[in-house]
Amino acid sequence: MENENKGKTISEKIFSFKSGKDAWAGDLVIAKIDQIALQDGTAPLAIRQIKEMFGGVKKIQAADRTHFFVDHAAPPPRKELSNDQKFIKEFAEEIKAEFNKPGEGIIHQIMVEKFVKPGDLAVGADSHTCTYGGIGAFSTGMGSTDVAVSVLLGKNWFRVPETFRFDLSGEFSKGVFPKDLILKIIGDLGVDGATYKALEFSGEIEKIDVEGRLTISNMAVECGAKAGIFPSDKLTAEYLAELGRAEDFTEMRSDEDASYEKEFYYQLDDIEPMIAKPHNVDNVSAVSEVEGLQIDQVFIGTCTNGRLSDLRVAARILKGRKINRNVRLIVGPASRRVYLKAMEEGLLSIFVEAGGLVLPPGCGPCVGIHQGVLADGEICLSTQNRNFKGRMGNPNAFIYLSSPATAAASAVKGEITDPGKYL
């Protein structure tokens, strides 16, 4: 057989475990799903589909693995969204599924903090479900109807993706962070350069902490990937232990003789602070090429960069400084846990004293529903994952993407600037 003496990638291993089949890239499998996540923007449609398909609510098989979140509009700014959130809460109570009310935090942060573990197969009605690959899970976003099927049956069909391997070596220079690496990769591949592939990161990954890995996995979908995956290792074990979940650790890594569709090599020392310019995530350049561009708003947060390490580096830059008088600074912790930790460490005070505004845990301005909608012609530098036209609520505004360090330094300067000067 062609695959008889060949090792498996992490993706092939997980799909083999979850399907009970000898699964390889390109195979179609029906696999058991460990965790299912839905948020307030996508859950209402999924709930309506659940009620209509396969005998409806009485046939649900995976309520104990299903988690509902209110994060995109938290708290809700309009009665229509309030009614949607009430609808979600009542349904979650009806089927006895997990419901995370407004203020708990962003779907992807909570799923990592509380539920997903290495080796899991997780799906979510949100494209950035791929975040959980940072701890060694295979996680991917699906449409609301596909997620409804997953809730009903506890399983779904998948095509096992081919894997692109990224071999990382070296160490980041001052002012350079995991966000800069993934922006560089997306710029190199293009928005559709890895369509339906799994991006697997290996090499000297011990130089990237777990929160940095989550940032990289989060943005895998921005070049079309189905998932972004890191092996689970000592750092993963330590991270889960900090969350009180030491027993959830399992080592997940590819076999040494696994086959990859493509292999890429990145020297971390060579990466500069990067930025994505409007209106596509692959419109990437070095910060030095746009340095000096005046900005109106800075947003530090989201499922990409709203974690504790992100807030810490931003606070290092902002401590003892004031933001430029022409800039609005908005900070959004990714979860209640992150918010409380940041409060304990005095980070929130630093942001407020610098002239910033701290939001409740949630998605905040990223989705343009409320909190930080831009005016016509305004420029925002954000740590989020997308800069599409109209993404932050106004198609006549402009969004640039960067690391939290670049964002914080630029808030002080009033224009896009290299964070190395402030660290």
Image (cartoon, helix red, strand yellow):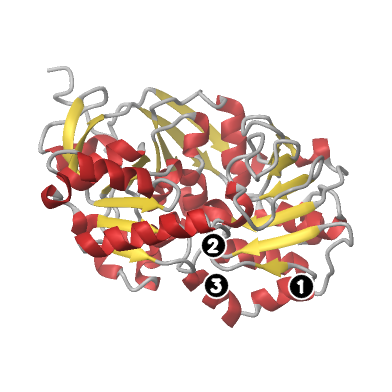
Query: Does residue 144 appear left or right of residue 3 in this picture?
Result: right
Tell me the crowding category of disc 1: few under 14, some 14 to 19, or many 20 or more residues within 10 angstroms, Cα based: some
**Which residue shows up at 52% across the image and 70% down it?**
338
Q: Is residue 227 visible?
A: yes
Considering only vertical position in the picture, is 283 above or below 85?
A: above
User: Which tag, 2 or 3, sits closer to the chain's start?
Assistant: 2
* Nearest to viewer (mark 3 / mark 1): 3
At label 1, the amino acid type is: Lys
At label 2, the amino acid type is: Arg
User: Which tag, 3 or 1, sits closer to the chain's start?
Assistant: 1
Which residue matches tag 1? 319
Q: Give me the disc on residue 388.
A: none
Which residue matches tag 3? 339
Q: Nearer the viewer, residue 348 or 182?
A: 348
Q: Nearer the viewer, residue 86 or 31?
A: 86
**Which residue shows up at 80% across the image and 54% down it?**
410
Considering only vertical position in the picture, is 346 above or below 281?
A: below
At label 3, the amino acid type is: Tyr
Q: Position of residue 173 (x, y in %)?
A: 68, 50
Q: Position of residue 166 (x, y in %)?
A: 46, 35
Tell me the quarter of the picture where residue 45 sits.
top left
